[in-house]
Structure formats: C-alpha cells, structure tokens
C-alpha cells in the first residue's frame, strides 16, 4: 500500500508524461505545417525574385494552397479527445480573419510596396508563432524570433536580392524549424 505522498508523486509523474505526449503531438502536427508552409514560401519568394511580375499571382497561390494543405493536415490528424472528430469551422475563420487583417494593414491603410510586403507578412506570421510559443513551447518562440530578426536584417541590409534572402530565411527557416520540432 502507498501513502499519500507516494500517490501524489505518482500522479504528478503521470501528469508530466501526459503533458509531454500532448506537446509531442502538437509539435508533430506543427512541424508538418511549418515544413508545408516553408516549401510554399520558399517557392513564392523564388518566383518574386525571378519573375517579379508574377509575384502577386504566386502569393495568392501560396496562400490558397497553404490554407488548403493545413485544413487537410487537420482533417488527417484530428485531435485526440472525444469531441475532436470532424472539422472545426473556427480554424477556417482564423485564417480568414488573419489574412483579412493583413490585407487591411498592407493594402487599405498602408499601401505597402513589394519590399515592405516581403517583410510585413513574415513578421506578421512570426508574431503569432512567437505568441503561440508562450503557451505551446519554446520551439515556436525560437523560430518566430529567429525568422523575425533575420527578416529585419534582410530588410535593412540586403538590396535587390531581398526576395532570395527571404526564400532562405522565411521558407528555409520554416523548413528547418519544422524539422527541428520533429526531433524535440
């Protein structure tokens, strides 16, 4: 028979294991999403650098394919709790709100040029990565702050090759971050 101290310690150990499993499942799904977006963002920045006239079309395609891919990932990897089956429309509303606010800031209020757009969107995405890290783990914070810092360095110090820089910083950073999260 165990006493109350031993029982409390055993329950604390079980709770710790449950939390680690939840975080590993979150990191698994988040890593797939980061790699997915990383590949798309890398391609979008390459198109922007090589064929600037096609940049607008490329980024619309990146955003649409990216969201469709994330919805697919979510459907293929439902949450592991009883009411988790099925699609939660709030996920789609998050993306609509996210992109609508970004569009409002960059095209209605700000009228950003290509260079400013090339810096704004990664910084905007990484803000949410960093904020998510406050709840879900330091990997998100590290990825968010790292890509943000490199984006600002590129914005202020890289000339015409800024889209190429961003292909490697943002796209490559997301891919590397996703691979790193798979190993944690």
Image (spheres, rainbow, N blue to C red):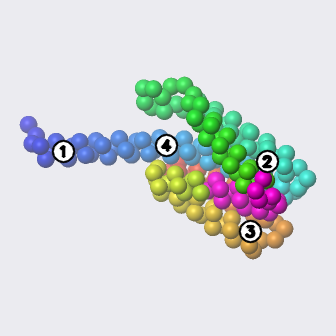
Tell me, yes or no, whether the two marked residues, 4 and 1, touch with CB atoms within 8 Å: no
Location of residue 84 in the rendering, given as x and y in whole percent from the top left corner: 48, 28
Taking the image as drawn, is residue 9 in sight?
yes
Question: What whole-number distance in Å separates the C-alpha atoms at marks 4 and 3?
Answer: 32 Å
Q: CA distance from mark 4 to mark 2?
A: 27 Å
Upstream in the sequence, badge 1 or badge 2? Answer: 1
Residue linked to disc 3: 155
Give the mark nearer the N terminus: 4 vs 1. 1
Q: Residue at x 47, y 55 (%)?
A: 134
**Marks 4 and 2 close (CB-CB < 8 Å):** no
Look at the image and give the residue range highlighted in magenta: 108-126
Crowding near pointer 1: few (<14 within 10 Å), some, many (20+)?
A: few
For the residue carrying disc 2, how many other residues have a C-alpha within 10 Å: few (<14), some (14-19), or many (20+)?
A: some
Quarter of the image for the N terminus: give it.
top left
Secondary element under disc 3, as helix, strand or loop, is helix
Residue under circle 4? 26
Neighbour tally class for label 4: few under 14, some 14-19, many 20 plus, Cα within 10 Å: some
- Say left or right for 167 vs 2: right
**x, y (%) of residue 113?**
82, 61
- The disc at residue 59 is 2
Q: Which mark is residue 148?
A: none
């Amino acid at each position: 028979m165990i006493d109350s101290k031993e029982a409390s310690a055993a329950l604390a150990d079980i709770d710790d294991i449950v939390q680690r499993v939840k975080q590993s499942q979150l990191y698994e799904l988040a890593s797939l999403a980061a790699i997915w977006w990383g590949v798309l963002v890398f391609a979008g920045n390459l198109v922007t650098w090589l064929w600037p006239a096609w940049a607008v079309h490329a980024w619309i395609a990146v955003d649409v394919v990216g969201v469709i891919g994330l919805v697919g990932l979510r459907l293929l990897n439902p949450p592991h709790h009883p009411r988790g089956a099925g699609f939660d429309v709030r996920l789609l509303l998050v993306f609509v709100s996210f992109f609508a606010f970004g569009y409002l800031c960059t095209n209605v209020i700000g009228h950003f040029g290509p260079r400013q757009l090339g810096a704004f969107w990664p910084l905007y995405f990484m803000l949410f990565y960093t904020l998510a890290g406050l709840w879900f783990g330091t990997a998100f914070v590290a990825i968010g702050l790292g890509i943000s810092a490199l984006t600002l360095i590129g914005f202020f110090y890289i000339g015409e090759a800024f889209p190429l820089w961003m292909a490697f910083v943002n796209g490559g950073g997301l891919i590397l971050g996703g691979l790193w999260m798979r190993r944690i």
